Each structure stands twice: as structure tokens, then as C-alpha cells.
Image (tube, rainbow, N blue to C red):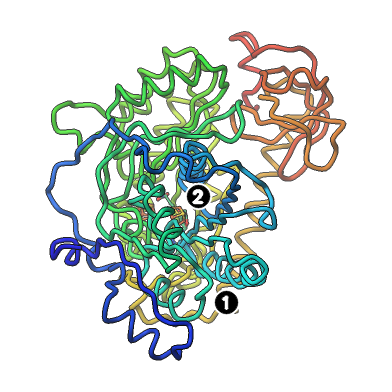
Amino acid sequence: MNEEQRKQGQLVESANPSDKKSEKDYSKYFQSVYIPPSLKEAKKRGKEEVKYHNDFDIPIEFKGLGEGKKFYIRTYGCQMNEHDTEVMAGIFMALGYEATNTTEDADVILLNTCAIRENAENKVFGEIGHLVHLKRENPELLIGICGCMSQEESVVNRILKKHRHVDIIFGTHNIHRLPNILKDAYMSKEMVVEVWSKEGDVIENLPKVRRGNIKAWVNIMYGCDKFCTYCIVPYTRGKERSRRPEEIIQEVRQLAAQGYQEITLLGQNVNAYGKDLEDIDYGLGQLMDDLRSIDIPRVRFTTSHPRDFDDHLIEVLAKKGNLVEHIHLPVQSGSTDVLKIMARKYTREQFLELVRKIKAAIPDVSLSTDIIVGYPNETDEQFEETLSLYREVGFEAAYTFIYSPREGTPAAKMKDNVPMSVKKERLQRLNALVNEFSAEAMKKYVGQVVEVLAEGESKNNPDILAGYTRKNKLVNFKAPKTVIGKLVKVKITEAKSWSLNGEMVEAGPIGAEFQEAEEVK
Ligand code: SAH
Ligand code: SF4
Ligand code: F3S
């Protein structure tokens, strides 16, 4: 490890404290040789140019590392993490490992973690605790923690002190180093900690094993520079880095050729796509326009930030075709004052104006959102403004959360006068409204014929199929299993709060003459 890496909090550290050492000695030992990931470092945004690599290869010395061994990855958090898991699975397979879907069977277990709220972290710590017995039964088992929690120094320190059965900790920026990290773990049988606090370059040709062959995730950018005051993501995922458009287009073309029916473009703030590409003037609008001409039935994106949602993108989305008429547009709060302290950089009025423009261009658009209740010092009036904005927009779905302080973020330092009981009550009231609006939107489908992408058997009844409409409504419907993976026309017979029931009337996509049918009257 050189001095530069130390400064960046970027290191590979193997330590071998004797098991006989007391916990205190152990942490002292680590403090002398171990530099934890640093949220302070992660906050910095440098001017360095992002380098793009296409030369990922598994060096010969790692080939066969996984022969006869099985891996298991449990994923927490957002789609970004799910996609990272697909990349890690690709690397495992390239190393000769086999996948397994039980922890009991595995030789390596990875927990790909999420740091977004305290309860997400608690779940992971609970699971780390459960894994102790497997490690006792099989000391050869490797247990690894990766993903967003690994980027937090408090988490790494807690694992070092309290969960010594963990063998590996690595972060979100060095997934491509998984072969080296595994090898280190086998060679030394010591805890291997490799967390880079600073983002790395963009590596294009990492192997991937996608879950399923109907829908696929496609990263378009990494990181986030928005620094909303409550949010840990800009610290755990580094600065915004866009992939080159030609790489994205090529990946989507390949997916289309392989028969995928739907892709979702991924980024924490996809509306900032392209802003960091200095040699070209190219944004999400252009990208969506280019993807329109690819023969893949559905293209979605997530997540949008209202601030950078521009007119060109609206214009392109209005052309429809394979661009679906559903937009997830997190608002977080309906109060301009709360939005200001959240550093969302738009007002209630600006958000409503954006919605007005979107609806004018795409009259049958379906909007969903994310909302945080109980932000520090949120007043009853401010919360009421969130309810009234929800009604005014007419969102059809929402993910709702109680604010959770995240160490290292500005909001975590704020004094908060809102008792938890009040926050819970607000969440309940908001959820009642969200359910009411969803049920209302669902009701209007009864009797209509909609296009559904048949994804597989329904969760609760294997005799019927399940899939989603273009507007992301879950439909359970009667149809032969042979249509799994295909677009079909389904007549809706019954509406529930969060799903629809129906019967297939015909195979094949809905053409222009049918598209009106999904228009909610
Ligand atoms: N990049 C996405 C959000 C990713 S996190 C965006 O900006 O839209 C998903 C959601 O988690 C956020 O929209 C927000 O509603 C919620 N969230 C983030 N940090 C949170 C916190 N500290 N407490 C509660 N909810 C939080
Ligand atoms: Fe977090 Fe805001 Fe970035 Fe979304 S835009 S990931 S909420 S900082
Ligand atoms: Fe969680 Fe990291 Fe995603 S904190 S929400 S897994 S970017």
C-alpha cells in the first residue's frame, strides 16, 4: 500500500490478529494497520477525468479458483445492487464457481448490502449474526460483506469488532477485484478488507449473469452528485460517471438480439446522464431517442430527479413506441421549505409545473413517487402539503419512508423535534392516501384490454401467470404457460388495490389500435 492509497482510504489490508487476543487488543491491532473507509474522503468530488476500460480479464492464476465450489449472494437495496450482484455472479462463474440458492450449500456467501435507512442495515446485521452457526459447522466457508454498507467506516469497525466470523469486506468501487479478494482470502485465511473510498474508473466488459431472460437492467451511469441532505448514496457510490452512449446502445442491441423484452436503464439520477461527457452534447433525451429505434418492446428508466428533467426528454418520451408511459419521479415532500432543507433544489410549484408539462405531452402518463415523512422538524402543515401535492398530482403509486438519520450526512446533525409516534402516524395517513389512489387507478382498468409482459407463474397460484403492463401494473391472469416471456393482450376482470386480475384474449403486443385501450378514462 502506498501513501497515496492510504490518503484515499484505498487499500488492501490483511490482518492476522490471534484469536486469543481480547476484543480490545484486536481493535487496537486493527487501528495500527488498518485505515477504514472514510465518508469524508467519499464526499470529495475531484476534477480527474474518468477513464474507460475494456480490458477486464481474469488472470490465468485465478482461473479455476472456484472449481468444485459454490457461491451464494443475498442482495439488499435497490436495482443498482441487484445489477451489481449479476456482475459478481458473472465473475464467480468465470472463476469456475457454481451458483447455489441456499446458504447451507455454499462455499462462499456474499451479502450485497444497502445503507439507505437504519432498518436496511439492521436486517444485514441480523443476517451476519445468523451466519455464525454455518461458519462454526464449516470453518472453510467464506463470508463476505459488500455493497453500500461496506463503504461506511462505522459499519466496517463494527464488523471488525463484533463479527469476526466475516472473512471479506469490499466496497462498491472494486467489484472487479473480486478474484484478487477471494484469492487473498483463501491464501491468508485472514480478514481481507478492501474498500476504496474514492470511485474508480468505468470498466465496460465485466462478465454478467443476468437473472432471467425476459427483463434486463442496463447501467447508464454510476454515482450521484446531488447530495440531498438526508442521503448516503453520494458517499457510498461516488461521483457521477456516465457510460459512453455507444456502449449502452450496443448492450441494448445485444439484449434485443438475445430476445429480452424489456430493459430498465439504471442510475441514481438518470436525468444527469451525459452531463459529465465533455466531448459530446448528449443527454438522457438523446439516449432514449436512440433506444427507440432498437427492436426491444419496452424501455424504462429509474430513477429520475425532477430537477434535471428537461423538455427534450419529455418530447422524446411523448413519441412512445417502446418508451413506456410510466415515470417514477420522486418528490420526497410537498413543502417548499422542507424541500429546501433537503437540498432537492426545486420548489413545490416547480415540481407541479414539471408534472403539468409531462401530462400535457403524455396525457395517459402514470406517475409514481418516493416520499419521506418526519424529516427533522417537519410541521403538521408541511406534512399536509405533502398530502395535498399527492392528491394534486394524482400519483398512482409511491414508496413511502420515515426519515432515517444517516451518519455523516448533514441532516443527521440536525436537531429534530418530531416524536417517532407522530412520524409513524404521518406515515399511516400517507399510506392510506397512497392505497386509495392506487385502488382508484386500478378500478378504471376493469373491462379494458391491456398489454402484459408475461413473466412467469403467479406468486400465490401456479395455475395462473403474472406480468406487468407498460404502466407497471401487476396483472395476474389466465393463460397457457407457453406465453411466458411474451407480450400478450389481457382483458381485466377485477381490480384490487395493488394488482389486477384478468384473462388472456390474444397473444402478441398491443398495436396502435389497442394502445388507446390502456388510456385511463
Ligand atoms: N436516487 C433516487 C433515490 C434512491 S434512494 C432518487 O433520488 O430518486 C430511494 C429512496 O429512499 C429516496 O427517494 C428516498 O425517498 C428514500 N431515502 C433516501 N435516504 C433516506 C433516509 N435517510 N431516510 C428515509 N428515506 C430515505
Ligand atoms: Fe440520494 Fe438525492 Fe442522489 Fe437520490 S438524488 S441518490 S436521494 S442524493
Ligand atoms: Fe441502498 Fe446503495 Fe442502492 S444505499 S438504495 S443499495 S445505492
231 in relation to 399, above or below: below
Q: Position of residue 396 (x, y in %)?
A: 60, 42
**Looking at the rendered structure, which numbered label has been put on residue 78?**
2
**Residue 256 image offset from top left, x and y in percent:** 50, 17
Q: Determine the residue positioned at 78% across, 41% down.
A: 459
| x 35%, y 31%: residue | 205
**Mark pair 1, 2: CA separation:** 28 Å
Task: Give the image quarter of residue 492.
Answer: top right
Q: Amino acid at mark 1?
A: Val
Q: Is residue 36 above or below residue 211?
A: below
Q: Tell me if residue 333 can be seen.
A: no
Mark 1 crowd level (few <14, some 14–19, many ≥20, 10 Å Cα): few
Q: Amino acid at mark 2?
A: Cys
Q: Quadrant of residue 231?
A: bottom left
Q: Nearer the viewer, residue 39 or 516?
A: 39
Residue 279 in the image: above or below residue 146: above
| Front-lying residue, 87 or 367 | 87
Return the x and y of residue 170 as percentages of the image width and height. 39, 59
Q: Is residue 268 left or right of residue 472?
A: left
- Give the labeled residue for mark 1: 422
Residue 382 position in % (x across, y down):
45, 66
Dividing the image into four quarters, tell me where ligand 3 lies.
bottom left
The secondary structure type at the circle numbered 1 is helix
Q: Earlier in the sequence, mark 1 or mark 2?
A: 2
User: Is the CB of the residue bearing disc 2 within 8 angstroms of ligand 3?
Assistant: yes
